[in-house]
Amino acid sequence: MSWKEKMKEFGGGNFCFLSSDGEVLTFIVVGEPVLLHSKYKGQEQQRIGCPVVTEEGYNLFICGKRLARKLSKHEAVFSNSALMVIRRGVEGDVNARYEVRVLSDVETYNRLKAIADKDFNPKMIAESVEEASGVLGE
């Protein structure tokens, strides 16, 4: 069994965060955003779950509202372009910045779209939201 399969078995494999400086996620969007509630350092917070497909397959990309708003500005290209998000800020920095790039590389979009067509089912979104909610402390 692969690490990816093991992590799905253990839980926590259906969602992801960007938490380290310079961390990058390349993806296509495959569904509508979902509002999630979390606790961070004892305070209630709202997060956005973005259904995406990466090289590793489907994930619920959990981010803050600032980044989700940046992503929403590119909604017109969700159906034909891949996106790249780069985190700028050390782990735990609530003032981290995120760079969003639309990739004009058609090959990346086509590769991720093929993964989505093969491995993604919209029912996976509800499962990942439930799993993420449990981890976030909803």
Image (spheres, grey):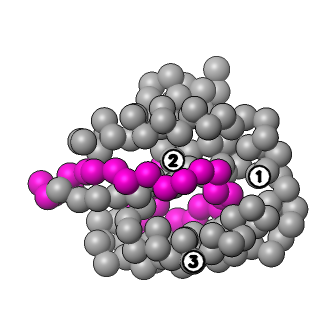
User: Which mark, by number, is residue 73?
Assistant: 3
Given this view, does label 3 or label 2 mark the residue nearer the observer?
Answer: 3
Report if the CB atoms under discs 1 and 3 are less than 8 Å apart.
Answer: no
Q: Is residue 22 magenta?
A: yes
Q: What span is in magenta?
A: 16-43
Q: Secondary structure at mark 2?
A: strand
The residue indicated by pointer 1 is: 112
Quadrant of the image occupied by residue 136: top left
* Image coords of residue 23 (percent x, y): 52, 65
Distance Cα–Cα, label 2 vs label 1: 15 Å
- The quarter in which the N terminus is drawn is top right
* Residue type at tag 2: Leu
**Cα gap from disc 1 to disc 3, whole angstroms:** 21 Å
The residue type indicated by label 1 comes to Leu
Q: Quick one: SS at disc 3? A: loop
Task: Report whether residue 55 is seen.
Answer: yes
Q: Earlier in the sequence, mark 2 or mark 1?
A: 2
The CA span between labels 3 and 2 is 19 Å
